[in-house]
Image: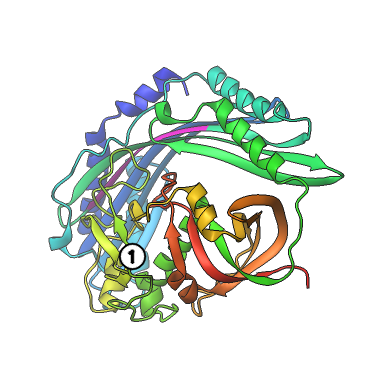
Amino acid sequence: MNKESSDILALSDVEELKNIVTDTLKMAQQKGATQAEAGLSVAQGLSVATRMRDVETIEHQQDNGLGISVYFGQHKGSANTSNLDPAAIRKTVEAACNIARYTSEDRCTGLADESLMAVQIRPLDLYHPWHISPEKVIELALECESAALDYDQRIVNSEGASVDSNAGISVYGNTHGFLQAQQKTRHSISCAVVGESDGKMQRDYWYDISRNPDHLCAAREVGLKAAERTVKRLDAKKLKTRQSPVLYVPELARGLVSHFTSAISGSAQYRKASFLLDAVDTQVFPEYFQLTERPFEPQALGSANFDAEGVAVAESDLVSDGIIQSYLLDSYSARKLDLQSTGHASGVHNLTVKNTGKSFVELLKTMHQGLLVTELMGHGVNNVTGDYSRGAAGFWVENGEIQFPVEEVTIAANLRDMFQNIVEVGTDIDCRANIFSGSMLVENMTIAGTD
């Protein structure tokens, strides 16, 4: 992305985009809609991918999108367009209105309550364009991959390196009079390589992501980390089936949290498709466990002032002393449950697991003997029963120290038991997503390997 293209988006007339949303809502009302909401996004980006020291792809992206939902009483219709010309928008509004006339009545449909709309808009520092030429982006991707390929002679192949930069503006408005714009950037560097030893291959990767390009790891460091991880996995062994503690690295630990948030989502609750039905005010985690949402963290990937319906978000404890404090509700699921929206129409915002004060090295020593999991495979999680079974790879630990890499095992338990058996959360917090967590030590899981 060159400097000129970044500045064009950074200086885009936000008021003009707001006017498009305002005009769209007016069209809907003129067509007879009793309520309406619209979301408009404009984004551009550059992506470069290399493989085996050659440039594989260079992609410039320029995307526009407008979505409109109209409500005729309790009948809803939605339509989308990528064409922002007035005539195209008019046809899109007409399409949404026509759809609404044929949909069934639903008492829970409609805009979020007007009293819940965000009023205070805080500066979150989410917009940092990367003023960099395509040639420099190519150079970074090649540097990243070359560092990985040159790390060790056992690195024999590459799945490639990529450098991505994206910037965008989004506007949301509805007929309550809510109208707000957000500007965001997102930049990343990643690399994945393949190693070989004694005819057997292993693959691993690394990446970094940030709103601010100045905060990204150096491209060379990302490549070296990917190669180091790959080499450590060579000459992996299998384990015999056993019961054992399992230590999840941070980027996988947040997956356990996401299984929890899925289970307490409003849609899972009103559909009765959750192993944590009616679980508010019950203890699901150990007493020390705290899970807090922090939506106003500057530059964080999950930061926001409002959700996808304009509902104000707030800092709050989702789990306190191991006890669930609330479901995650948008307006529709809230009405289904006779509750109030919690501002989660667009998911969670910087959900943070409080650590227990131990470093990763200290967690290994606490575990003493067990499996350190660095990769999970498959989708063996049943959100209705809580049954959990995933293919895994990682390292076997004895006497608090890593002994050898492990492959082709399955780890299994029930999520209810796993949550209760989280005995430690590390200080090695990973903030590269909207869930912040350190490593998690879970007691007493089944490791299925060779008999």
Structure colour scheme: rainbow
> Along the horizontal axis of the image, is 400 left or right of 181?
right
Labels in figure, total = 1
Q: Name the amino acid type tagged 1.
A: Tyr
Residue toward you, 90 or 68 = 68
Q: Position of residue 251 (x, y in %)?
A: 51, 50
| Residue 291, horizontal then vertical, whole percent | 33, 60
Q: Horizontal and vertical percent for residue 34?
A: 20, 65
Q: Quadrant of residue 155?
A: top right
Task: Tell me if residue 13 can be seen.
Answer: yes
**CA neighbours of label 1 inside 10 A, class few (<14), some (14 to 19), many (20+):** some
Q: Is residue 84 above or below residue 290?
A: above
Position of 291 relative to 236 (above/below) = below
* Residue nearest the observer in this picture, 375 or 326: 375
- Front residue of 127/218: it is 218
Magenta span has 12?
no
* Displayed quadrant of residue 334: bottom left
Question: Is 149 positioned to the left or the right of 336 in the image?
Answer: right
Residue stretch rendered in magenta on the structure: 164-173
Q: Quadrant of the C terminus?
A: bottom right
- Badge 1 marks a residue whose secondary structure is loop
Residue at the image point whose x is 50% and y is 37% from the top: 208
Q: Residue furthest front?
A: 399
The image shows residue 277 at horizontal and vertical percentages of: 38, 80
Residue 388 in sight: no
